[in-house]
Image: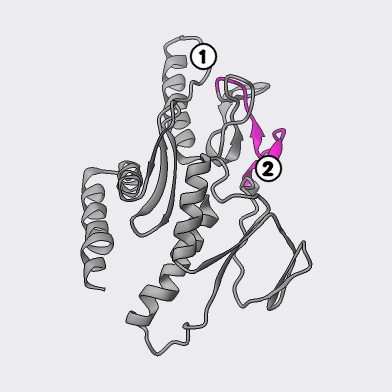
C-alpha cells in the first residue's frame, strides 16, 4: 500500500508540480514504474478497489508491471524476474518492515521480521513486566496470527499496555489485548484514495475516501492545534491550489 501511495505522489510531482514550480529542471521524460509480484495493486482490498487504484495510477502516468519482481538492483538499473532491465537513477524499495536493531540487542527471542514475539497481554514470555509494542513486536490476534504493522495497532497497543501497567500497580490481573479493527485505507494521489471502514469493510473510493484518510491521520496528531494546522494546510494544498493549476 505504501508503494502505491509513493508511485502516485511521484507521478504527480513529476507531471503536475515540477513543471510549474521548477520548469528549468529536465523532468519531462521521467517515468514512474510500479513493480509488484502480486497481480493487483492494493492486494488487501476488494477487486473493485484494485481496478480503481490501477486506473487512477495509470491516469497519473504510472506504468504497472504486475506479476513480476525485482531480481537485481544495481547502479543505474533494475533487472526484473522476467529478464527485463529498467534503466533508472532512482529505485524505491518496499520489501517489508524489519524491527529496529534494539530488538536484536535486547537479548529477547525474535520472530518474523526480527520482531519480538509477545504474549496475548503484550508482555514478553518469561518477562511478565516487559512489554513490546508497535513495529518492535509480533502481536497475536484472536486466531494467533500476527496483527499487521499499522499505526492503529501500535496506538491501541500502547494505550492497552499503559492501562495494564496501571492495573498491575492496583493488583489487577493482566488481560489479553483486544484490537478494534477500524478498517484499512490507502492514498493513491490528490483526491484519490481507497478506504474500507470498520469490521464490515464499508468501501469508499475517490474524494470521500481521501477526506477520510486525511481525517484519520489528523486524529493521530498530538493535539488540537496540530490537527487544525494540518487541516488548513491540506485544504490549501489539495483543494484550493488545485483549482488554480
Q: Residue at x 64, y 22 (%)?
A: 144
Total labels drawn? 2
Q: 229 or 213: nearer the eye?
A: 213
Eyeballing the image, is 137 above or below 194? Answer: above
Please say whether residue 119 is one of the residues in the magenta stretch. yes
Magenta region? 102-121
Q: Is residue 211 left or right of residue 50?
A: left
Quadrant, the C terminus: bottom left
| Residue 243 % position (x, y) | 22, 67
For disc 1, the marked residue is: 174
> Residues at badges 2 and 1 in contact (C-beta under 8 Å)?
no
| Residue 64 % position (x, y) | 59, 62
For disc 2, the marked residue is: 113
Eyeballing the image, is 134 above or below 63? Answer: above
| Residue 145 % position (x, y) | 64, 27
Q: Residue at x 43, y 15 (%)?
A: 167
Q: Which mark is residue 52?
A: none
* Element marked by disc 1: loop
Q: Is residue 15 left or right of residue 119?
A: left
Q: Residue at x 28, y 61 (%)?
A: 238
Residue 236: name its quadrant: bottom left
Q: How is the protein colored in the picture?
A: one colour
Eyeballing the image, is 240 above or below 203? Answer: below
Q: Residue at x 22, y 44 (%)?
A: 224
Q: Is residue 78 left or right of residue 120?
A: right
Amino acid at each position: 500500500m505504501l508503494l502505491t501511495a509513493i508511485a502516485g505522489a511521484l507521478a504527480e510531482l513529476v507531471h503536475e508540480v515540477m513543471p510549474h514550480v521548477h520548469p528549468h529542471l529536465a523532468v519531462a521524460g521521467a517515468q514512474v514504474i510500479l513493480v509488484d509480484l502480486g497481480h493487483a495493486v492494493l492486494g488487501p482490498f476488494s477487486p473493485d478497489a484494485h481496478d480503481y487504484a490501477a486506473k487512477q495510477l495509470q491516469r497519473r502516468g504510472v506504468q504497472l508491471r504486475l506479476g513480476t519482481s525485482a531480481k537485481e538492483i544495481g547502479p543505474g538499473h533494475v533487472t526484473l524476474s522476467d529478464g527485463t532491465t529498467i534503466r533508472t537513477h532512482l529505485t524505491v524499495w518496499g520489501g517489508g518492515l524489519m524491527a529496529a536493531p534494539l530488538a536484536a540487542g535486547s537479548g529477547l527471542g525474535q520472530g518474523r521480521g526480527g520482531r519480538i514475539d509477545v504474549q496475548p497481554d503484550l508482555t514478553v514470555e518469561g518477562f511478565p513486566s516487559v512489554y513490546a509494542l508497535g513495529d518492535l513486536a509480533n502481536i497475536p490476534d484472536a486466531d494467533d496470527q500476527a496483527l499487521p504493522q499499522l499505526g492503529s495497532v501500535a496506538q491501541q497497543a500502547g494505550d492497552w499496555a499503559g492501562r495494564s501497567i496501571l492495573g498491575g500497580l492496583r493488583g489487577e490481573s493482566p488481560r489479553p489485548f483486544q484490537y478494534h479493527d477500524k478498517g484499512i485505507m490507502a492514498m493513491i494521489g490528490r483526491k484519490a484514495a481507497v478506504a474500507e471502514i470498520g469490521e464490515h469493510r464499508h468501501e469508499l473510493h475517490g474524494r470521500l475516501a481521501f477526506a477520510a484518510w486525511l481525517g484519520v491521520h489528523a486524529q493521530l496528531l498530538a493535539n488540537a492545534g496540530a490537527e487544525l494546522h494540518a487541516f488548513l494546510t491540506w485544504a490549501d494544498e489539495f483543494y484550493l491550489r488545485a483549482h488554480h493549476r
